[in-house]
């Protein structure tokens, strides 16, 4: 069975939309033969953008909109929950870094506090439900004095897993 990079062989292609984690060297080779558009490709390790077309989100603006919405609802203590480390890597994922930076900048622009206690980052151990809830509970983030009135998650998967676990604990969200 051919691998995904062998599928392009000599067959004609109109173009390629690359949304997987294909190594940049392979996509660059494709881009010499076909029109290529990458979806959400981040900078390479040396800080260079790909030489082919790409479509990506502006994570800073996204966090600005989230904070604007939550602040508009009256929230003043907003926590940010993320899992910045990529599996099998000690490096923070660029999207998570952009999101937490954008979140903190948005709070500052509105004169809201950026409290380290409300910036929850945990390692991806493969057991996000347990790890996330243990950190939130052990830091008494969800209850007690100084608890946030809103939580912002770095991605949908974290938010969905939190919602399921919160319901399991009887928390209303």
Image: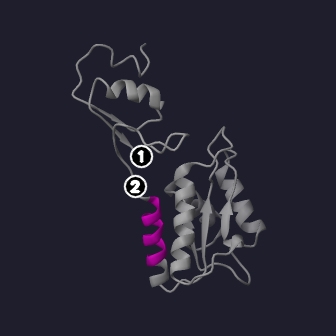
Q: Considering only vertical position in the picture, is 138 above or below 77?
A: above
Q: Please rate how many residues cluster around mark 2, counting C-alpha atoms within 10 Å: few if below 14, some from 14 to 19, many from 20.
A: few
Q: Please rate how many residues cluster around mark 1, counting C-alpha atoms within 10 Å: few if below 14, some from 14 to 19, many from 20.
A: some
Helix, strand or loop at disc 2?
Answer: loop
Return the residue nearer the eye: 45 or 63: 45
- Residue 7 occupies which quadrant of the picture? top left
Q: Considering only vertical position in the picture, is 116 above or below 77?
A: above
The residue indicated by pointer 2 is 57
Q: Considering only vertical position in the picture, is 23 above or below 144?
A: above
The residue indicated by pointer 1 is 40
Helix, strand or loop at disc 1?
Answer: loop
Q: Decide if residue 1 is on the left or right side of residue 141.
A: left
Image quadrant where one finds the C terminus: bottom right
x%, y% of residue 40? 42, 46
- Earlier in the chain: of badge 1 and badge 2, it is 1
- Identified at 70% across, 71% down, the residue is 116
Residue 77 sits inside the magenta stretch? no
Q: Decide if residue 111 is on the left or right side of residue 5.
A: right
- Identified at 44% across, 36% down, the residue is 20
- The CA distance from mark 1 to mark 2 is 7 Å
- Identified at 39% across, 29% down, the residue is 28
Q: Which residues are magenta?
A: 59-69
Image quadrant where one finds the N terminus: top left
């Amino acid at each position: 069975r051919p691998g995904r990079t062998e599928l392009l062989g000599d067959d004609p292609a109109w173009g390629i939309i690359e949304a997987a984690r294909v190594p940049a060297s392979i996509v660059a080779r494709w881009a010499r033969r076909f029109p290529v558009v990458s979806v959400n490709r981040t900078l390479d390790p040396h800080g260079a953008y790909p030489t082919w077309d790409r479509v990506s989100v502006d994570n800073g603006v996204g966090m600005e909109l989230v904070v604007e919405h939550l602040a508009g609802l009256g929230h003043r203590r907003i926590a940010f929950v993320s899992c910045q480390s990529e599996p099998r890597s000690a490096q923070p994922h660029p999207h998570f870094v952009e999101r937490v930076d954008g979140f903190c900048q948005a709070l500052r622009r509105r004169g809201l506090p950026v409290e380290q206690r409300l910036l929850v980052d945990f390692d991806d151990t493969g057991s996000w439900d347990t790890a996330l809830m243990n950190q939130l509970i052990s830091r008494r983030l969800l209850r007690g004095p100084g608890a946030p009135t809103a939580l912002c998650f770095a991605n949908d998967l974290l938010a969905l897993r939190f919602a399921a676990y919160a319901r399991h604990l009887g928390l209303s969200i």
